[in-house]
């Protein structure tokens, strides 16, 4: 089991090295590694700000996540993977340094999946509730912690009310903060405009404050 997970971990690193985000995301979800997945989404977001890092910058610029390949993965997520990703977003959204990434991925999910699909995924409708076995906590292994088997299946499911109840208040808080920043930016822009107006006035006046006749 450990050997198998070591191979999967190496596969994940290989996918990242060649920027195969599609397979890397699916593998990170299957290994239950939220920290690595957050790092991946953050890297994609940063790369989207550098057009030269993309083979098709125009297409990536129009994507919701910063990469059309990541968009495609989110669009095609199975109900169980969608539920798992939403549970990660719930936690990322509570931390200021990761909230921007969380909001970006959440926005993409809501663009590609309607409300009924999201609710059904969170409630685990149509899926088996039997135990799917045990997986190793590779996140803990990477941090030097003792790895303990974690159950997959029924115990890993998140109640829809719990996830939405955590997402909504923090999202509203982030929106309020963003709205405040937008309003403050308009104030700064207005003040800068006024300062430029004063500069123009000074150019057209003499030392005594009298307007200079340029004729």
Image (cartoon, helix red, strand yellow):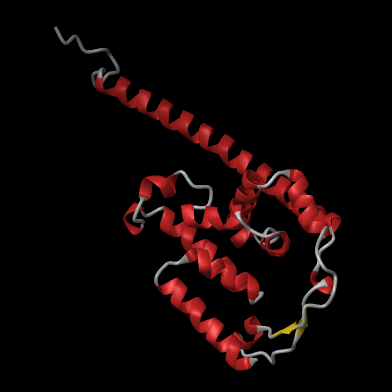
Q: In which quarter of the image is the C terminus?
A: top left
Q: Residue furthest top?
A: 215
Q: Which residue lies furthest to the left in this view?
A: 215
Residue closer to the observer: 28 or 175 = 28
Q: At 62% across and 90% down in the image, what residue appears?
A: 144
Q: In which quarter of the image is residue 207?
A: top left
**Residue 80, percent from left and from top:** 73, 63
Is residue 169 visible to the viewer in this orientation of the structure? Answer: no
Give the vertical position of 29 relative to 123 (above or below). Answer: below
Q: How many marks?
A: 0
**Residue 44, percent from left and from top:** 47, 60
Q: In which quarter of the image is the N terminus?
A: bottom right
Give the vertical position of 85 relative to 66 (above or below). Answer: below
**Residue 78, percent from left and from top:** 68, 60
Residue closer to the observer: 166 or 80 = 80
With 172 as the anchor, is 54 left or right in this view? left
With 200 as the anchor, is 160 left or right in this view? right
**Residue 209, percent from left and from top:** 30, 18
Is residue 110 visible to the viewer in this orientation of the structure? Answer: yes
Residue closer to the observer: 140 or 194 = 140
Q: At 76% across and 56% down in the image, what residue appears?
A: 121
Q: At 63% across and 57% down in the image, what residue appears?
A: 102
């Amino acid at each position: 089991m450990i050997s198998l997970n070591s191979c999967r971990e190496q596969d994940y690193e290989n996918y990242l090295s060649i920027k195969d985000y599609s397979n890397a995301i699916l593998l990170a979800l299957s290994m239950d590694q939220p920290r690595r997945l957050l790092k991946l989404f953050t890297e994609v977001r940063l790369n989207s700000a550098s057009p030269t890092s993309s083979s098709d910058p125009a297409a990536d610029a129009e994507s919701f996540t910063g990469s059309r390949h990541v968009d495609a993965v989110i669009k095609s997520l199975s109900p169980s993977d969608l539920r798992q990703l939403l549970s990660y977003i719930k936690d990322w959204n509570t931390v200021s340094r990761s909230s921007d990434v969380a909001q970006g991925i959440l926005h993409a999910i809501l663009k590609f999946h309607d409300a009924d699909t999201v609710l059904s995924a969170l409630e685990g409708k149509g899926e088996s509730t039997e135990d799917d076995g045990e997986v190793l906590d590779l996140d803990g292994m990477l941090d030097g912690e003792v790895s303990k088997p974690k159950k997959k299946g029924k115990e890993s499911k998140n109640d829809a009310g719990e996830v939405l109840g955590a997402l909504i208040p923090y999202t509203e808080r982030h929106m309020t903060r963003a709205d405040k920043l937008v309003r403050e930016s308009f104030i700064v822009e207005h003040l800068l405009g006024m300062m430029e107006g004063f500069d123009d006035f000074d150019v057209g006046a003499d030392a005594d404050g009298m307007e200079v006749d340029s004729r």
